[in-house]
Amino acid sequence: MISRWLRFLLWQPYALLCRRFPLWPFQVKITQPVEFVTCIQIDNLLTRTLSRFSGGYDYAVCYLVDETLLIDTGFPWARRSLKQTLQKLGVVETITTVVNTHYHEDHTGNNDLLVELCDAQVLAHADAIPEIRFPVELRWYRSFLFGPSAIADAQPIGDSIKTEHTRFEVIETPGHCPGHICLFEPERKILFSGDLYIAADLDSQLGDADGPKWIASLEQAIQLRAEWLFDAHGTVLKGAEAVEQHLSRKLAFLQTIRDRVYEYATHAQTIEELTRKVFDRRGLVDFLSFGEGWLSLITGSDFSRSNIVKSFLREKFQQEASASLIEELEKEAGEPRISSA
């Protein structure tokens, strides 16, 4: 309770000030990788430093399509820079729709700005809407890096969404978190992938990650044979071969973790012991983090390797329980019945 009062009295005024006047200056990069698509990248020294240690991706990447659709809105600290950028591009009056690929604050942090500035409608998967409309209080490091979650209304997205020159299919791709979606334009083979890819070998995840569903989503995305991939953290891939190669690397990485979980989860042990066996790394960071990875050190184990391991454990024992039930049913069906007569 004391910590909540301290947060209310000290952190809230600081957070409100930083949304208008960031403590660390931001830089904005605007590119147009393909026709009708404008990429807006916003970051600062803190997020750039974090990015370099986490796979080399950027933060607060928004994609503007046909000057009417904005895919993701970045994190709250980038509010002022995003507002100035949209005004500079002259799209404040043209943006009508925002699509959130998922509910994490670095993708939804400025939904309220788009509603206020553009009177835009925010759309997301139904499973993501509770987290967007009723955001939880973030852990300290997430609040410090990205800013407090903004409250904004959101509505369920349909099966597709249109702009003047494009028609996107909405692809359900859970795994990174529940309610994650991708947008796929079948005519031009363009895939806006949210956080489906991020980095191929980023091993530490939040507790809402689901490895088995992530594998299924990657397999589904590979089948689309996309020729352009726009990752929500700045990776842009051109060519069907390059897209398939990167998605396949991510898929193989997760499949390897799953196989090792199945191999080593043969007897009772702590999740920390199992995680160390699955990843089998012995560097200084692994020693200091008890095998959970460097991200767990700076996030108080909020990001950790064991989160993804747990999701594969749930799959393993669900499968074993199902197999056991089927075996029992088959055994019962094979036994002769004695007539009560």
Image (cartoon, rainbow, N blue to C red):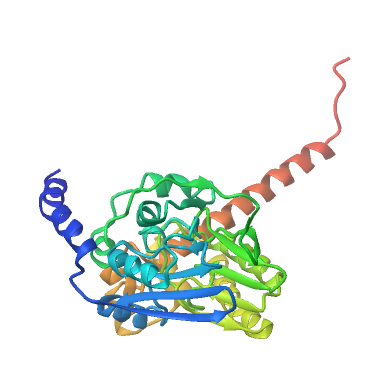
Q: Quadrant of residue 139?
A: bottom left
Say which of 298 and 187 sits in front.
187
Q: Quadrant of residue 276?
A: bottom left
Residue 45, percent from left and from top = 26, 80
Say which of 341 and 262 sits in front.
262
Left or right of 316 in this view: 336: right
Say which of 58 and 93 sits in front.
93
What is the residue that sits farthest to the top in this orientation? Answer: 341
Residue 218, percent from left and from top = 62, 68
For the C terminus, the image quarter is top right
Q: Identify which residue is drawn at 50% across, 63% down.
A: 71
Left or right of 195 in this view: 227: right
For the N terminus, the image quarter is top left
Residue 270, percent from left and from top = 39, 60
Q: Note whether residue 124 is visible.
A: yes
Please count the marks in the image: 0
Q: Note whether residue 300 is visible.
A: no
Say which of 233 and 175 sits in front.
233
Left or right of 102 in this view: 13: left
Q: Identify which residue is drawn at 15% across, 56% down.
A: 11
Left or right of 297 in this view: 186: right
Q: Identify which residue is drawn at 35% across, 83% down.
A: 52
Q: Is residue 95 above or below residue 187?
A: above
Residue 141, percent from left and from top = 25, 64
